[in-house]
C-alpha cells in the first residue's frame, strides 16, 4: 500500500487527482474542496494523479517511486520536485 501525501501548501484544489484516479475503489475523498487520500489501500500505484497534478502536490513516500526513477528520466524530474 503506498503512502500518499498531499502537500496542501501547493495544492490548487483543481481535483484533477480525484477525477483521473484509476483505482476500482475510491482512494480520494473531497473534504473542504481538497483531496484527501483516505483509502490508500485501494491505490493501484499507476501514479496518474501525481503526473497530472499541475502543482506537483502529490507525493508517494515509498519505494515505488524509486523503482520508477530507474525506468524513465522524466520521472526523475518529478521525483526531484516532489521531494
Ligand atoms: S491535482 Fe494536485 S493541485 Fe489539483 S487537487 Fe489534486 S493535489 Fe491539488
Ligand atoms: S496512483 Fe493511481 S490509483 Fe493511486 S491514487 Fe493515484 S491515480 Fe489513483
Image: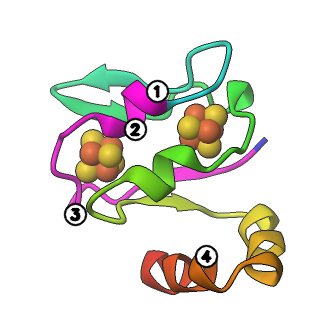
Q: Quadrant of the N terminus?
A: top right
Q: Is tag 1's residue or tag 3's residue first in the polypeptide sequence?
A: 3
How far is the residue under mark 2 from the one under mark 3?
A: 14 Å
How far is the residue under mark 4 from the one under mark 2?
A: 17 Å
Q: Quadrant of residue 17?
A: top left
How far is the residue under mark 1 from the one under mark 3?
A: 17 Å
Residue picked out by circle 2: 17
Give neighbour class at mark 1: few <14, some 14-19, many 20+ (Cα, 10 Å): many
Please tell me whether mark 1 or mark 4 is closer to you in this view: 4
Label 3 beta carbon within 8 A of ligand 1: yes
Can you tell which mark lies on residue 10?
Answer: 3
Give neighbour class at mark 2: few <14, some 14-19, many 20+ (Cα, 10 Å): many
Residue name at image x 27 percent, y 63 percent = 55
CB-based contact (under 8 Å), mark 1 and mark 3: no
Residue name at image x 28 percent, y 58 percent = 54
How far is the residue under mark 1 from the one under mark 2?
A: 8 Å
Residue picked out by circle 1: 28
How far is the residue under mark 4 from the one under mark 3?
A: 19 Å
How far is the residue under mark 1 from the one under mark 4?
A: 23 Å
Span of residues in magenta = 2-20
Q: Is tag 1's residue or tag 4's residue first in the polypeptide sequence?
A: 1
CB-based contact (under 8 Å), mark 1 and mark 2: yes
Label 2 beta carbon within 8 A of ligand 1: yes
In the drawing, does residue 38 fall left or right of residue 70?
left
Q: Secondary structure at mark 1?
A: loop
Residue name at image x 43 percent, y 82 percent = 81
Please tell me whether mark 4 or mark 2 is closer to you in this view: 4
The location of residue 83, given as percent across then percent down, is 49, 81
Please tell me whether mark 4 or mark 3 is closer to you in this view: 4
Q: Is tag 1's residue or tag 2's residue first in the polypeptide sequence?
A: 2
Amino acid at each position: 500500500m503506498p503512502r500518499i501525501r498531499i502537500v496542501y501548501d501547493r495544492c490548487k484544489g483543481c481535483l484533477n487527482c480525484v477525477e483521473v484516479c484509476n483505482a476500482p475503489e475510491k482512494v480520494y475523498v473531497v473534504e473542504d474542496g481538497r483531496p484527501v487520500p483516505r483509502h490508500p489501500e485501494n491505490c493501484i500505484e499507476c501514479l496518474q494523479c501525481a503526473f497530472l497534478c499541475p502543482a506537483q502536490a502529490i507525493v508517494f513516500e515509498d519505494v515505488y517511486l524509486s523503482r520508477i526513477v530507474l525506468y524513465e528520466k522524466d520521472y526523475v524530474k518529478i521525483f526531484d520536485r516532489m521531494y
